[in-house]
Amino acid sequence: MGRNNTNVTPSNPPNSSFTFSISNTGGVNMDYPLPPCTGSFNINLPSEYNGSNSSVFIYYTNRNSVIRAYDNDNDGNFIIDNMLCSEDSVQFVIISQINGIREYHVSEQFEIPGNWNYTVLENSLK
């Protein structure tokens, strides 16, 4: 991974590589999926990581789309509500910068079972 790019490769055919330039972090606009997409999830980061120094992006491997999770109260709990369908397959990318040091984490691919929580351990951030 370069300092300003992250590569996300879906595991479902056709295998392709998608490069997302991460020169800054901001909102991503995505239309709401069709009902009954009511699944939600929380991604919990270690205590010093929060919405003021970290961003969490969710990559839909079966839709080739990316959305951003938000930590509105800077408690390290990033939330997506009512944006996951039962057939979705996702990976998430965490990018943090603390004291000038960038760290990242790319999750394995998840099949969405409904509502779920995921806790990221500090030693999984590189």
Image (cartoon, rainbow, N blue to C red):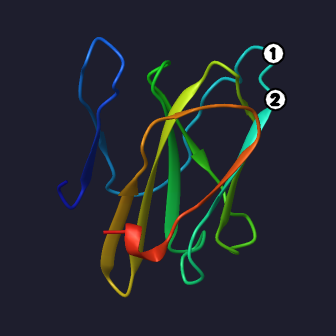
In this view, 93 is above or below 9: below
Give SS at disc 1: loop
In which quadrant is the C terminus drawn? bottom left
In this view, 18 is above or below 34: below
Q: Are marks 1 and 2 in contact (CB under 8 Å)?
A: yes
Furthest residue in direction left, as rendered: 2
Identity, as a three-letter code, of the amino acid under mark 1: Pro
Question: Where residue 38 is drawn, which disc sits there?
Answer: 2
Classify residue 16 by image quadrant.
top left
Residue under pointer 1: 35
Q: Is residue 54 left or right of residue 21?
A: right
Q: How many dots with numbers?
A: 2
Residue occupying image coordinates x 75% and y 71%: 73
Give SS at disc 2: loop
Measure the C-alpha gap from mark 1 to mark 2. 7 Å
Q: Is residue 54 left or right of residue 41?
A: left
Identity, as a three-letter code, of the amino acid under mark 2: Thr
Between 57 and 122, the one lying in front of the other is 122
Classify residue 109 by image quadrant.
top left
Q: Is residue 81 visible?
A: no
Furthest residue in direction bottom, as rendered: 99
Residue 104, given in percent of the width and then of the height, sits at 36, 62
Within 10 Å of the Cα at label 2, are there few (<14), some (14-19), or many (20+) other Cα atoms? some
Residue occupying image coordinates x 81% and y 29%: 38
Within 10 Å of the Cα at label 1, are there few (<14), some (14-19), or many (20+) other Cα atoms? few
Residue occupying image coordinates x 28% and y 11%: 14
Residue 125, given in percent of the width and then of the height, sits at 38, 68
